[in-house]
Image (cartoon, rainbow, N blue to C red):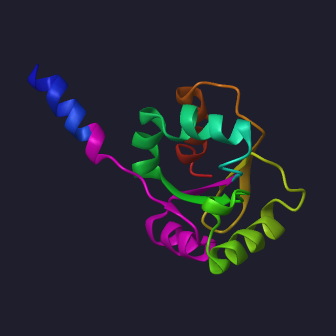
């Protein structure tokens, strides 16, 4: 019972932060030598985006891996008035989309090295388990690419 309780507490404490500023993310990635995962999302209108967030990006397997290996960036493009972002955040998201997602794909997820080189992308919902998603990412972190 103690092991289960301790595991539960560790799971609660293992949290990840999604940044909204790509420049901040690249600085952090350069300092920590981590890869960057960028997720383009329409959080309040895109069904596959909502599904990816709930089934993969908020799954404990992904969170545990990301906490130690990734710098996370979310570029969200909500449509509902109640979910609108600040003008500054909208500009940051649009600049990131201009650079990495000019076709406006949703969801669109990219794995990028600390220098901005795209290592892998997922166009649409990654139709795989969170563990398989993590395995794909870890193949880049384990090879030193």
Residue 37 at x, y percent in the picture? 61, 54
Q: Is residue 46 left or right of residue 74?
A: right
Magenta residue span = 11-40
Residue 82 at x, y percent in the picture? 61, 61
Question: Per the image, is 97 magenta?
Answer: no
Corner quadrant of residue 93: bottom right
Corner quadrant of residue 86: bottom right
Residue 29 against residue 111 in the figure, above or below: below
Q: Is residue 66 left or right of residue 134?
A: left
Corner quadrant of residue 56: top right
Residue at image coords 39%, 41%: 64
Who is closer to the viewer here, 107 or 86? 86
Who is closer to the viewer here, 92 or 62? 92
Numbered label tally: 0
Residue at image coords 58%, 68%: 20
Residue 69 at x, y percent in the picture? 46, 51
């Amino acid at each position: 019972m103690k092991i289960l309780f301790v595991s539960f507490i560790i799971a609660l404490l293992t949290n990840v932060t999604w940044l909204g500023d790509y420049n901040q993310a690249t600085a952090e990635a350069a300092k920590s030598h981590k890869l960057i995962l960028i997720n383009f999302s329409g959080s309040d209108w895109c069904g596959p985006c909502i599904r990816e967030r709930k089934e993969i990006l908020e799954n404990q397997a992904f969170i545990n891996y990301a906490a130690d290996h990734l710098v996370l960036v979310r570029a969200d493009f909500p449509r509902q008035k109640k979910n609108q972002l600040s003008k500054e955040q909208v500009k940051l998201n649009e600049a990131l989309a201009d650079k990495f997602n000019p076709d406006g794909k949703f969801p669109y997820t990219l794995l990028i090295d600390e220098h901005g080189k795209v290592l892998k992308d997922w166009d649409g919902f990654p139709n795989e388990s969170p563990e398989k998603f993590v395995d794909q990412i870890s193949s880049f972190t384990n090879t030193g690419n």
